[in-house]
Image (tube, coloured by chain):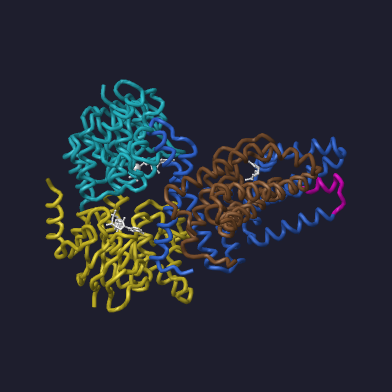
Chain colours: A blue, B brown, C cyan, D yellow
Amino acid sequence: MISLYRPGSSPIHRLPAWVKLLALAAVLLAFSLLPKNLWVASFSLVLALVLFMVAGMAPRDFLMNTWKLRYLIVVIALPQIFLVDLATGCYNSIIILGGLLMATLVTITTKTSEMVELVKRLTRSENFALLIGLSINSIAVVGSIASGIVESGKARGVRPSAVRQLTNLFVVSLKQADDYAEALAARGVEV
Amino acid sequence: MRFELKLRDYPRIAIFVGLITALSFVPALYLAPEVPVTAQTLGVMLAGAVLGSYRGALAVLIYEILALVGLPILASGKGGLSAFTGPTGGYLVGFIFGAYVIGLVIEKLPKLNIALSSIIGFILGGIVTVYIPGILWVSYSLGLPLIPVAQGNLVFLIGDSVKIILAVLVLLGIKSANPKLLEN
Amino acid sequence: MAIRLEGVSVGFDARLALSEVSLELKARSTAIIGINGSGKSTFARLLNGLQKPTAGSISVFGQAPSQKTAGFIFSNPDLQIVMPTVFEDVAFSLRGQKLAPHEVTESVFEALAKVGLLELETASCQTLSSGQKQLLAIAGAYVRKPRLLIADEPTTLLDLPNTKRITKVLHQTEAEQLVIVTHDLELAATCEQAVWFDGGNLLQSGPSKEVIAAYLAKFND
Amino acid sequence: MAIRLEGVSVGFDARLALSEVSLELKARSTAIIGINGSGKSTFARLLNGLQKPTAGSISVFGQAPSQKTAGFIFSNPDLQIVMPTVFEDVAFSLRGQKLAPHEVTESVFEALAKVGLLELETASCQTLSSGQKQLLAIAGAYVRKPRLLIADEPTTLLDLPNTKRITKVLHQTEAEQLVIVTHDLELAATCEQAVWFDGGNLLQSGPSKEVIAAYLAKFND
Ligand SMILES: Nc1ncnc2c1ncn2[C@@H]1O[C@H](COP(=O)(O)OP(=O)(O)OP(=O)(O)O)[C@@H](O)[C@H]1O
Ligand SMILES: Nc1ncnc2c1ncn2[C@@H]1O[C@H](COP(=O)(O)OP(=O)(O)OP(=O)(O)O)[C@@H](O)[C@H]1O
Ligand SMILES: O=C(O)CCCC[C@@H]1SC[C@@H]2NC(=O)N[C@@H]21
Ligand SMILES: [Mg+2]
Ligand SMILES: [Mg+2]
């Protein structure tokens, strides 16, 4: 499974995941306490840009991630400009953009496996770790069942209805889940 | 009710994480920008209906944890922290409770025909329980007034009604193929 | 006529699953062999248009590959069965052909007779054994009278008698050509010709005995 | 010692999957053969306690069957992997044994070395080939030092070189006894003894050459 992680060795990459998450929460909280004006909003955007650079991302990456959020900005800004006022509309859209970019940065600088590790450590449960492991594996298993069903449908020359294929996907997947349970039992897993 | 998990529940919950993911990859349709019509909710509904209340909710929770930590498995391949702080975060939270409510309704109406009890469950859990936090969060996070947001959200009723019908058909299909698969 | 590939490549992302394969298949039956990941399934999927080539050209009986001329059988029959009963499932393959009901019935009965499932006509598909499910999948492909029949590891899940039965049925169908992808070298040996793929390259093709012998020789230490 | 069954029956609903099987397995390696649905997997599952007998008694090395004494390998390697990386997956088998971290590491390395996956220790399980996944499943069973190792059609999804490798690794483990359920008669022939089930009945047991010859004779027409 590919992940959103972008490899790198910057200081931000090297920070432990929990530090990054705490820092993000602190920054977002701080902004909500600061006065709501355009200076503060713009500062959040500048901060996001600086953090992207520190993480070794090119300005292009920053712009690309911003571009991905373009509709969001339009949706936020337009109604507010009409319903409330121009300044509030701009403040809200910029501050949200800054926050989302910083959250994105945490995601793309932290290995998925490290995040999973953090979640496991927080829950301190072996069974939870098992559930996570099985789930990640199941994404691939269901994916191959689904593509098999789609292929078989096409290969027959007559496409079965969506409901039939969907039902088949659930039936075959749930049967595999029971085989999976058997394999776990055989391995001596007790929960 | 005791929240106990048997060994068999583990892979069943896990396989639903896979199923919800697979359905999220069905190309999403953007009627309104940012909040897509997605087949993902079909997976959420069936998680509640097939696995039952707390197991269904757990499947959705794990799916979202995996998305949160960076797997691109949400609607149209999104994932990561920003998907949750973004405008659809409320729906995502609603999914967890929605699956729970669906399972609960079906469990509380054991005498009713499964088609009927699941329809009631899907409406209460798959629509009401998902829309409430969804609408509140869209309104709050985007700083928009509640009423127009709620009205705008009505467009999803069409898609979600179709998904309810699909979910009932799939549920009946699983039952007729192998009723053991619905036993928990 | 027959099946003809010229300089066919298939790429996934950066890597080539098949690279510049040129080949003509004329024998009535051809086995495709090779290790896991060597490109066998990709080749088979090309022949009925499930997979489009990245480069090169393919013709099957002088035409572009299509699901009309070629029937396809997979190793897991569970993925192929779509209707509740045996009869309905085979009849499903004829949908959209605008046949009168009695024509459908006749064709379905003929296909079921061919694979030996006639008595099970009204049975629920879920109650069939794995061998019977695979026979049903063959009937579902066969009923459309494909000129080419392709089977991708059709016997992996089956026991000896079922394997023999499926092998016999595949060879007895009236398709003009038969292509079988398999790891089972005994099944491969039932075909006249064999083609050996390795890392996406055509390594050897010719009489099945020779190709199989070479394949075995490579992995015997 | 060894494995001993006395009058063992297993019933599902109305039908018997095994009926009154009495048998002693003493050889280092035993193959279980028979057609689809003949009771092979049911027999294998009895040996590590996954399946309880409806009647009769079983002992494995003088004890009741248990997952502690017996490791089990299935045919689909995808369904036997539970953790994200190779090391973690093997280590997972040791959970609940209250071992010190260095003991876990040592055992895991030893098991990985046995199946030849040591270099892949940190690899993500999803990136393994199907043959490597099956080797990983063996390591996951082997790391618990089972006295009995059971494999239910371990090579059906694999190609020739992978089949050879798995066969070799299975025979090389230090388990005292090895039981392999298989349709692949070449794999069966690598075992000293063979047992043939038919419709839930023990039809024949003895040196694998003889049993396989009789099995082949029955289905050759
Ligand atoms: N849809 C796909 N996307 C990316 N890579 C693919 C895809 N399908 C096949 N491949 C790759 O192409 C190569 C050939 O695959 P193919 O399935 O044709 O092999 P095969 O010979 O049928 O193997 P097996 O014996 O395991 O079935 C492999 O390396 C495989 O990983
Ligand atoms: N959990 C179950 N519930 C009901 N019937 C079962 C169950 N497991 C097995 N059976 C039945 O018991 C019989 C023996 O099954 P078993 O799986 O042991 O056969 P097998 O020899 O392993 O077959 P195959 O070669 O297809 O794997 C079959 O008729 C099967 O349908
Ligand atoms: O980002 C996501 O993955 C969540 C998308 C949420 C879409 C909501 S769910 C309720 C409503 N019905 C739909 O089809 N889409 C919206
Ligand atoms: Mg293949
Ligand atoms: Mg079996």
Is C160 on the left or on the right of C201, as rendered? left
Residue D29 is covered by the magenta coloring: no
Closer to us: C23 or C26: C26
Q: Residue at x 56, y 68 (%)?
A: A125
Residue B77 image position (x, y, % from top left):
58, 43
**Residue A6 visible here:** no
Residue C188 location, quadrant: top left
| Residue D197, placed above or below residue D60 | above
Residue D61 location, quadrant: bottom left
Q: Which residues are magenta?
A: A34-45
| Residue A98, placed above or below residue C43 | below
Residue A154 location, quadrant: top left
| Residue D48, placed above or below residue D182 | below
Q: Which of the image's four quarters has the C terminus of chain C?
A: bottom left
| Residue D117, placed above or below residue B33 | below
Is D140 on the left or on the right of B77, as rendered? left
Residue D186 image position (x, y, % from top left):
20, 54
Residue A36 is covered by the magenta coloring: yes
Tell me the quadrant of ligand 3: top right
Q: Which of the image's four quarters has the N terminus of chain C?
A: top left
Closer to us: A150 or B73: A150
Q: Dominant secondary structure of the magenta stretch?
A: helix
Q: Residue at x 28, y 63 (%)?
A: D170
Count of numbered tags: 0
Residue D156 image position (x, y, % from top left):
30, 52
